[in-house]
Image (spheres, rainbow, N blue to C red):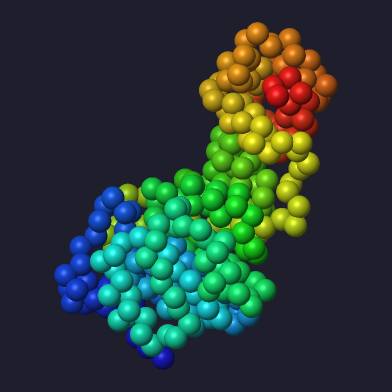
Amino acid sequence: MHKDIATPIRTKEIMKKYGFSFKKSLGQNFLIDPNILRNITDYAGLTKKTAVIEIGPGIGALTEHLARTSGKVLAFEIDQRLLPILADTLSPYNNVTIVNEDVLKSDVQSMIEKELGGYEEIMVVANLPYYVTTPIILKLLTEGLPIKGICVMLQKEVGDRIAAKPGTKEYGSLSIAIQYYTQAETVMIVPKTVFMPQPNVDSAVIRLTKRAEPAARVDDEEFFFKVTRSSFAQRRKTILNNLTSQLPDGKQKKDEITASLERAGVDPGRRGETLSIQEFAHLSNELLPHFQ
């Protein structure tokens, strides 16, 4: 058994050895508590039959736990300075492939085919850089990748929004976009003290389990997401006012919007945060013919 990377002493040793300094622009915060890493891999439900995609491995603290518990790890690291460090810290493990690419620009599907072929089950497990959390999760879900789920650490406040239920102040278009594809739950709150450097906010680990079918039937996904985003444009406004001001030619089509709301059984005086995903789906299907 190798000494864990995720301890303050070992992290400092590695950084000193390579003269590494944190880049604020890349949102680098390294975990220095092995117990939390073990918990993350437990929540992700990994076995040797699982392949893992990791984003932002840093110096390999979580990667080594993933390598120990899963069949294979494919990690995307944008920061070139970390490649020699990872080659060193992960040298005991022969089931890790590091790709020096920005996951947002990468063709993840073809990387999966190339590196993870033969694995039935693929999980995304990562301590995500805070500044790109949402675009990364949405990319992984909207590209229809063959993944079973996502178990990631992110800013607690973003986690709250992702897992929020209708009628709460955290619930919004992000909650809907992610819950449309997955079942979302917060499995763990992580204090800021277990990171180096210490971020300003606490973190959370959220687990997203991909649904076999989306949460609701919509006739046009792009339009459905446009309707949900428009409905939350100004949270204090009613859904009718938001849709009228946000949809193309909405002001001219106020009567059509009102009629669509009524057909969908949604009171025009309600606010976006009170509607379930199913209600939004029903509403966007009613609105669609007027905005094609």
Q: Examine the rendering and report whether any part of residue 151 can be seen.
A: no
Give the tally of numbered discs.
0
> Residue 59's quadrant in the figure?
bottom left
Task: Give the image location of residue 40, x and y in percent.
Answer: 51, 69
Examine the rendered structure and indicate whether residue 199 appears above or below residue 246. Answer: below
Q: In this view, does 235 lie above or below 163?
A: above
**In the rendered image, which quarter is residue 35 located in?**
bottom left
Side (left or right) of 37 relative to 215: left
The residue depicted at 65 percent of the width and 8 percent of the height is 252
Horizontally, residue 278 falls left or right of residue 172, namely right
Q: Where is residue 229 in the image (x, y as percent from the top left)?
A: 58, 31
33, 22: nearer the viewer: 22
What residue lies at 45% left-to-right and 52% top-to-bottom? 104
Q: Which residue is drawn at 38% across and 88% down?
A: 92
Relative horizontal placement of residue 12, taking residue 108 as reference (left or right): left
Residue 178 in picture, x, y percent from top left: 61, 47
Residue at the bottom extreme of this rendering: 1
Q: Can residue 251 be seen in this view?
A: yes
Q: Which of 152 and 141 is in front in this view?
A: 141
Q: In which quarter of the image is residue 260?
A: top right
Choose between 98 and 225: the one closer to the eye: 98
Q: In which quarter of the image is the N terminus?
A: bottom left
Q: Is residue 274 left or right of residue 126?
A: right
Residue drawn at the location 61% of the way across and 26% of the way down: 231
Quadrant of the snapshot with the C terminus: top right
In the depicted structure, whether residue 75 falls above or below residue 92: above
Quick check: 282 above or below 111? above
